[in-house]
Each structure stands twice: as C-alpha cells, then as structure tokens.
Image: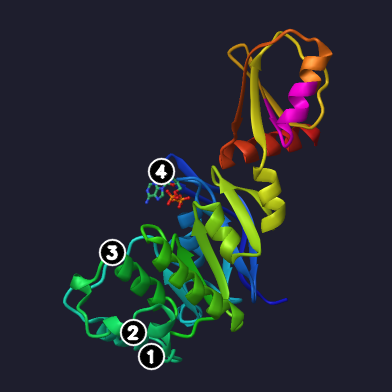
Amino acid sequence: MTILARAIEVSRRYGGVQALDRVSLDIRAGELVGLLGPNGAGKSTLINLFAGLRRPTSGTVELLGGSPHDPVMRRGIGVTPQDTGMPETLRVGEIVDFVSAHFPDRADKGELLERFGLSDLIRRQVGGLSGGQKRRLAVALAFVGNPRLVFLDEPTTGLDVEARRTLWEGIRSFHEGGGTVLLTSHYLEEIEALAQRVVVVGSGRVLADDTVRAVRDIVGVRRVSLAAANLPELPGVLGEEREDGRIHLVTTDPDRLVVELVRSGAPFSGLEIRPTTLEEAFLALTAKESANV
Ligand SMILES: Nc1ncnc2c1ncn2[C@@H]1O[C@H](COP(=O)(O)OP(=O)(O)OP(=O)(O)O)[C@@H](O)[C@H]1O
C-alpha cells in the first residue's frame, strides 16, 4: 500500500529537551490514524515534522514520496495546527477563498462549509465567531485544497459535544471518500470514535502502534499497590515496580490478583487499586518488554 508519510529513526531536540527519540512511523493511503499521548509526549512535534514546519535533529521524514519542505508535496496535504490565528475582520467565506487560492485543486466551497456545519456563517466576520465555530473553521481549512493527507492537531479541543460530533462527521466523510488522516488527541474516546489504528507516544517514543481494540485492552490495566517485603508469583502481572517500600503491580485483572495474594498468605498492608494513566500503563508494559529482551 502507498505510504504517504514516513518517519525513519527521527529524533528532535529543542535545546535540552528530547521531544522525539528515534521514532519510526508509516502512514499509509486510506488510513485514519490516531496519535495519542499525554502532554509533552511529542505529538505536535511529529506533526510539525511531517508538515515541513520543523526539521528533525536526526533521521529522515518523507512526505508523499518526497521532502516535507518541497512546496509541491505540501500542496498535497492539509494541516490544522493546535493554535491558529485568522484575521478577525475577514468573513468566513473570504477566509475559505483566500486559503483555497493557494491550491491548484480546490474543494467545493458550499460542500466544505456544509460538511463542517458552517454554511449559515459564511458572511460572518471571524472576530464574531465563537471559539467552537473558529475551531471548526480552522479544521475545515485543512480540507480546502482537496488534500490526499490531512494532519489535525487536537481538532476538537475546546468544543462542546455537538460541535465535536459535527467535526467528527466531517473528518469521517473525508476518510470514507478515500482521504488519509493523522490526528492527535489526549482523548481515547475521540480516537475510538474515528480511528482504526492508534499510535501511542510517550516521552518522545512510540509506545504502541496497533488497532484501537488492542490498545484499549492494554490501557484497561489497573495498578495494584501495596506494602510487602516479598511477594509470591502472582497471576496476570504485566509489570512490577518497587518504590519507597511499596510494590506497584500492573495487571488487567486486579480482582484475581488480590484473591491470589490473600490465598498465598503473604503478609501485606496498604492495598490500593487504581486505574493507571495511559503513560504509566505503557511505560510499565515497555519496561517489561525491555526486561524480557
Ligand atoms: N519550540 C520549542 N522549544 C522548546 N521546547 C519545545 C518546543 N516545542 C516543543 N517543545 C518541548 O518538546 C516536548 C514535546 O512537545 P510537543 O508539543 O511535541 O508535545 P505534545 O505531545 O504535542 O504535547 P501537548 O499534548 O501538550 O500538545 C515538550 O517537552 C515541549 O515542552
């Protein structure tokens, strides 16, 4: 299948901060890929590298078979960054005309505005739009040049439920028409609603790259913490960490683990069970993976 965007062993540093650490990733034609990760994981940096807005410190980034810095390649993509500034006095219709003038192939304006629930706002000045309406416009602008590939950085942040659904519909219809999308989100629900494939990043690395279902199963893990000198072998432990006299166990089945723990008769105190954060879950799993190598 055609690869539309590719990162090969890509690292990016900002001074002392390692934003990306040897990331390799292919985005294939027709995919809708969700990039999921906590704040500062490196998601925006990766999108900016693909979109040619930044250069990697090392490694290679390819876009549509060429360089992300080639204007010809960049005309084949659409991007909505996390923050967008638009001239306040221009009307919605004028902004769409202005942006689409940069592209040789243009989406039908009426259809585009309809798709993103903006038809009634065509004559409204941007300065008079609500935050949610502005965001929908910013996302719609990624599609004006009939792109092959679209990058959306947190497209629905700050939107209410209805606006979020309208936007999801717009993204879905582009994808159903054969378009390829890479979108970032902090929200698992958003990725679940839209994507088939999810790439989880944390601390600049790819922690998981799989189907949404597989990743959901992984992030369904719980953290069982307790104080104990020693523990017997317990079932379903995916990761184990010791910290300040406490033991943290990562498991998909905390009930069974606790039953077995009690059955074993091993002394323990201060039992706590809580959901792991995404980052913790994946760090625990990767720690276990590297320990097994
Ligand atoms: N221009 C910059 N100068 C210095 N550090 C930067 C710059 N851009 C990003 N960083 C740092 O690089 C790391 C990755 O940032 P990035 O914005 O890519 O993460 P993110 O996953 O998109 O985060 P968020 O979800 O908060 O948007 C962070 O530690 C961030 O502070």
Q: How far from the left and from the top, in percent, is residue 38?
A: 50, 45
Q: How far from the left and from the top, in percent, is residue 242?
A: 65, 19
Q: Residues within 10 Å of mark 4 (few under 14, many from 20)?
A: few
Q: Is residue 97 left or right of residue 257?
A: left
| Magenta stretch, residue numbers | 249-259
Asked if the residue under mark 2 is in contact with the one under mark 1, i.e. CB atoms within 8 Å, the reply is yes
Q: Secondary structure at mark 1?
A: helix
Q: Residue at x 44, y 81 (%)?
A: 115
How many marks the image carries: the answer is: 4
Judge whether 19 appears above or below 7 on screen: above
Mark nearer the viewer, 3 or 4: 3
Asked if the residue under mark 1 is in contact with the one under mark 3, i.e. CB atoms within 8 Å, the reply is no
Q: Residue at x 36, y 57 (%)?
A: 158
Between 85 and 163, the one lying in front of the other is 163
Looking at the picture, which amino acid does disc 2 mark? Ser
Q: Secondary structure at mark 2?
A: helix
Nearer-N-terminus badge (3/2): 2
Judge whether 97 appears above or below 69 on screen: below
Q: Residues within 10 Å of mark 3 (few under 14, many from 20)?
A: few
**Residue at the spot of label 4:** 15
Nearer-N-terminus badge (3/4): 4
Does the Cβ of the disc 4 residue fall within 8 Å of ligand 1? yes
Q: CA distance from mark 1 to mark 4?
A: 45 Å
**Residue at the spot of label 1:** 110
Q: Residue at x 61, y 50 (%)?
A: 22
Does the Cβ of the disc 1 residue fall within 8 Å of ligand 1? no
Looking at the picture, which amino acid does disc 1 mark? Gly
Q: CA distance from mark 1 to mark 2?
A: 7 Å
Looking at the picture, which amino acid does disc 4 mark? Gly
The quarter of the image holding the N terminus is bottom right
Residue 9 appears in which quarter of the rendering?
Answer: bottom right
The quarter of the image holding the C terminus is top right
